[in-house]
Image (cartoon, rainbow, N blue to C red):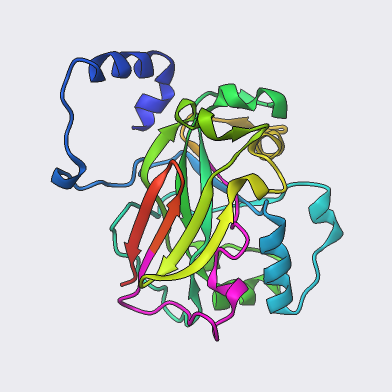
Amino acid sequence: MLEFIRHSGEALPALKEQSNTEEGYDLEDVRLLAPLPNPASVRDFMAFEQHLLNASKQSGLTVHPKWYEIPVFYFSNHQSIHGPDQEVEIPPGCEMFDIELEIAAVIGKEGRNIKAVDVDEYIFGYTIFNDWSARDLQMQEMQVGLGPAKGKDAATSIGPYIVTKDELEAHRTGDRYDLKMTASINGKPLSEGNFKDIYYSFGQMIERASSGTTLYPGDIIGSGTVGTGCILEAGPDVQPWLKSGDEVELEIEGLGVLRNRVK
């Protein structure tokens, strides 16, 4: 898939032509893996204001004014990608395991110092992104002034597939998409939001990420958590931290449903 994305300019038209002449497979007859198991890199932003406000309130913190000036991100572990229906193991010593309901853009074209208005030509497509979070480990390390790092090291789930950007045009509203986002744990609703409510667009995020550096095909850019999209925001009294056997289901309109079970 990484090679397909790198050559998507030629590969996508050929695939579309082939799909018009050949039969495919029913989803019930196949097992889907991570649509991009070996991304070149993973950057995850924090671009939804409501998530930041909710999480800060639960943690007894205030929102830093610099957040309103620049979109910020961290590098996640691009070697720990999980796919749909794949079990996710709780990290050792973690008692506050959490989910994060996000959308991610997959870069399809090499670019440096990309301007926000030009970003569409650099995006291959979009996928659901679950930034599994060991909150207690994250809180420990961030007291030192670094991170998140180890608290996000164990797993990131993406899928169930990558939807090319042209498939979402009907949902476009300016530089965003009107896409309903929901999360549930063991069938119990946890979160409901919409991608259009994001504070920073993917154009702004990718402009920031590519400033002074090169983005490559197969790089993943996460949006950060939609408002209400994690246990931290709701509080453990509303939804306990994840435990072995819990089933998490994330759904984004137009992108499908991403399910994982906690091991």
User: Relative to 255, is 46 on the left or the right?
Assistant: right
Q: Quadrant of residue 120?
A: top right
Q: Quadrant of residue 242?
A: bottom left
- Quarter of the picture containing the C terminus is bottom left
User: Relative to 38, is 108 on the left or the right?
Assistant: right
Residue extending farthest to the front is: 170
Estimate the x, y position of residue 127 in percent, counting from the top left: 45, 43
Residue visible at 63% across and 27% down? Answer: 119
Regarding residue 49, the answer to whether it shows in the image is yes
User: Relative to 83, is 23 on the left or the right?
Assistant: left
Q: Main secondary structure of the magenta part?
A: loop
Relative to 143, residue 33 above or below: above
Estimate the x, y position of residue 95 in percent, counting from the top left: 47, 83
Regarding residue 113, the answer to whether it shows in the image is no
Residue visible at 29% across and 59% down? Answer: 86
Q: Is residue 54 magenta?
A: no
Residue visible at 20% across and 48% down? Answer: 31
Relative to 195, residue 123 above or below: above
Q: Specify start and end residues of the magenta stretch as a single range.
A: 221-248
